[in-house]
Image (cartoon, rainbow, N blue to C red):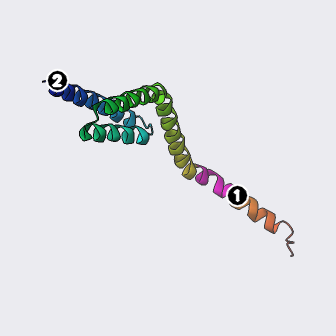
Amino acid sequence: MFSIVVAEDFDFEVSKLVDRVSGLYLRGVNISSVVEKLDNAVKVYEGGDVEKAWSLLNEVHGMVTELENVADETYFWLMFNRIVTVALLVSIPIAVYFLLPRLYLYLWFRVRRRWVVRW
């Protein structure tokens, strides 16, 4: 009976952590080390070492908590970079439309300024 309760608790904790980690992934946080540690915890638990699995699960819980503290800032900078990239890509055709004729005329006059007109 005790092992069934421990297994249900462990599975419940793992599922809660997986939900939290997936939320971090959606916010653009690098979660590769957390996923590896969580995978190791599950493998150790399946191997039969329950105490080590719980300690690894506690480490994962701490890592997830730390990442959740910086997730909002990471998400802000990710969105900021995307917005700036889109703005720059949109501004390129507009800049070419306005600046290319001016550049062409400037270069045309610079090349032909020493030409002499004869009657």
Dot 1, crowdedness within 10 Å: few (<14), some or many (≥20)?
few
Kind of residue at badge 1: Leu
Residue 73 x, y percent position in the rendering: 50, 29
On-image quarter of the N terminus = top left
* Numbered disc 2: secondary structure: helix
Residue assigned mark 1: 103
x 80%, y 68%: residue: 112
Q: Is residue 93 above or below residue 40?
A: below
Per the rendering, the mark at residue 2 is 2
40 falls in the magenta region: no
x 32%, y 33%: residue: 53
Q: Is the magenta stretch mostly helix, strand or loop?
A: helix
Kind of residue at badge 2: Phe
* Numbered disc 1: secondary structure: helix
x 87%, y 68%: residue: 114
Q: Give the range drawn in magenta.
A: 95-102
Comparing 36 with 110, the one in front is 36
Q: Tell whether 112 sits left or right of 102.
A: right
Q: Tell whether 17 sits left or right of 78.
A: left
On-image quarter of the C terminus = bottom right
Comparing 41 with 3, the one in front is 3
> How far is disc 1 from disc 2 in space, using C-alphas?
80 Å
- Tag nearer the camera, 1 or 2: 2
Dot 2, crowdedness within 10 Å: few (<14), some or many (≥20)?
few
